[in-house]
Amino acid sequence: MRVATLLTVAVVFLLGSPAWGADLAADPMVVRIGYLTRAEEPRIPQTFLEPVSEDEGVQGARLAIADNNTTGRFLGQRFELVEATVPEDGRVEDAVRDLAGQGIRLLVADLKEDALLAAAAAPEAGGMLIFNTRAPDDDLRNERCRANLLHLTPSRRMQADALAQYLASRKWMNWLLVVGRTPQDAAYADAIRAAAKRYRARIVEEKRWAFEDANRRVDTGHVTVQSEILTFTQGAEHDVLVVADEADGFGEYLLYQTWLPRPVVGTHGLVPTAWSRVHEQWGATQIHSRFERQAGRWMRPRDYTAWMAVRAVGEAATRTRSADPEALAAFVRGPDFALPAFKGQGLTFRDWDGQLRQPVLLAGPRVLVSVSPQPGYLHQFSELDTLGDDRPESRCRIR
Amino acid sequence: MPSFREAARIGALALLGFAVTPNAQADTIFVSNEKSNTVSVVDGGKLEVVATIKVGRRPRGITFNEDMTQIFVCVGDDNRIDVIDVATRKVVDRLPSGPDPELFVLDPQGHRLYVANEDDNMVSVVDIATKKIVGEIQVGVEPEGMGVSPDGKLLVNTSETTNMAHFIDTESHKIIDNVLVDARPRVAQFSGDGRFVWVSSEVGGTVSVIDAASRKVVHKITFAVQGVPRESIQPVGIQLTSDGQRAFVALGPANRVAEIDARTYEVKRYHLVGQRVWNLALSPDEKRLYTTNGVSNDMSVMDLERGRVVKSISVGGAPWGVIVKP
């Protein structure tokens, strides 16, 4: 992996074929969108079927720029992505200042929670609209919410509610919860507990995964896993095993290795997620094939949320016929905004916490199992608000 | 999901099959079934499936040739158009289509098919006689709906992610104008006099009526059904009567067809049909409307004189397109 020692800033011009004919204005309006990420060790999936990729997120943003430009050529608009990567030990505030200096006011942030908050708190970020395309943390939508942040990534609570609605519809109400060792796993488990409470499921027992995460390639192979998990999953009777392992350290090993023959759900097995390759409804087939042609791999949730963020700006530019970042940001936050994103309905932002309302996929390893909200979960304003923090529950006070 | 009461109504409608008017209907109805890779043939008199034709994978768009002796079917997953002989009810030929064809339209002279290539931001022009692609027109992201003016001079293509209706000159294959509509435009349908184009927006939940000469949206039709969430109202198929009086719009997962006064644009009624109604076809005498219901795997038959649904007929899996031959 290449570790940047300096802040690398690349301006990417993604234009289609130049032969647009008479419909192209001589001097197109230019909309520039920033994309900020931090250099890091790549995620190593436990499965050998998934590639190790170092371009998760940015590929989705690049595809959306290409899509925006296809539309923009009919309206005399051009879109550019200004990509910036902060070194592992670098300060995101410096990158925000640098991007602001280049005129960036609309910023896609592929950052984890702390880096995201640091970026949003930079003095230059005051005049920016920042799209969170990575951090699912519930406190970012509540106690730590910020007025200049919109969240494309579904919160952990939305994911947990989506899963819980499905389990409740099946009457699988007794859950064994297995929690990994990271703070993210603890946060995921908190969301699962909140969903259990909301949908009246019982967490019959909690277990903390205590084994060392091992290299996925070891010569002893499956033998240790087989004996470890059999004993580890003994305990109270349950309908499903809910696993909280966001880092993909062990969850994959739980399937078929448990003491009781029970399905695995959560971060592994049946997974609530913004996006998955198994999803082909509502025209998703087309974006998969565009993405795979461009990136040479499957589209991941971080690619999808980045695509949505850049498309949100594109949609605002199309509807307002403007390239002014202030006007675009106002439209995205306004009542007339709705983003079609292969989920069968227009997606809008919640005004109380900046979270994008969205159906959440329930993806099996090979096919799509369901999409939440489940039928019958009604709401006085939007059924999508049965997922995550609804207005009366929100603890966000500064929006 | 419909309520039990709705499901019961749909079931009850099926039982009412005996009440169908005996007078009409030597029609033959052809339905493309996206999931079962077949075309169902329905006898308009008996209102029964009388044959099932195997075609390529994922059949959606379906249309007749000029003299109605052949049927063209877009089989998207096989990247081609299958040609069915109407008399023998067999696939007898295939045409090139460009990648992933979904919908197409036959030019009024019957020589060419204009095909939306959903995967490639492109409209392909297929010459039927020579079986060759004779033109490619770059359009917006995810081209879908195709409409052609009665004189054949103007082609309209909608692009689902660009959210525009592209007006194309069929002589030069050049885009002459682009009209912004609401989110995810699906079907484009010219009025019989060629003056207006109706474009349905599935996610936007509206139908835009565009003046074909000025390319301005002259009216935007909105829908509201008691007890149905706004997001479930997803207009797709459009049919206009030849006298220009009435219009019908399929509302997708709202499980209804809207009946509209085509002069005032006022929605007069909502007719309950099957689940996820995609596309519509008027019978040639315009006394009936046939609908494809993608989730309930059936076709609803509406008697337009009595103003109600008279029968539901099980067809193949995920019925999508529908056409009628007198």
Image: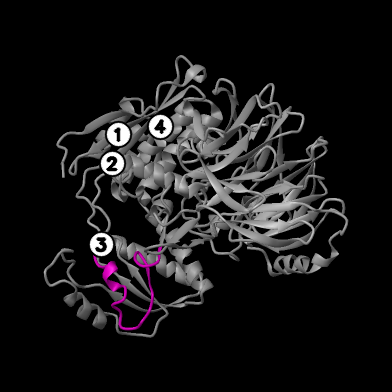
Disc 1 crowd, CA 10 A, few/some/many (<14, 14-19, 20+)? many
| Badges 1 and 2, same chain | yes
Task: Identify which amino acid the numbered label 3 is placed on.
Answer: Thr
Residue ID at (45%, 30%): A70
Does the residue at mark 4 contact the one at mark 1 (Cβ under 8 Å)? no
Does the residue at mark 1 contact the one at mark 2 (Cβ under 8 Å)? yes
| Badges 4 and 2, same chain | yes
Q: Nearer the viewer, residue A366 or B58?
A: B58
User: Does residue A36 lie above or below A367 as drawn?
Assistant: above
Q: Which is nearer the N-term, disc 1 or disc 2? A: 2
Task: Identify which amino acid the numbered label 4 is placed on.
Answer: Gly
Residue ID at (69%, 70%): B4
User: Does residue B184 lie above or below A18 as drawn?
Assistant: below
Q: Which is nearer the N-term, disc 4 or disc 1? A: 1
What is the chief secondary structure element of the magenta stretch? Answer: loop
Task: Identify which amino acid the numbered label 1 is placed on.
Answer: Glu
Q: Badge 1 is on which residue?
A: A83
Q: Badge 4 is on which residue?
A: A127
Q: What is the CA distance from the residue labelled 4 to the residue labelled 3? A: 42 Å
Q: Nearer the viewer, residue A156 or A220?
A: A220
Q: Residue furthest top?
A: A26
Percent from the top left, x then y, of residue B320?
A: 61, 52
Secondary structure under the numbered disc 2 in the rendered image = strand
Numbered tag placed on residue A47 in the rendering: 3
Q: Badge 2 is on which residue?
A: A37
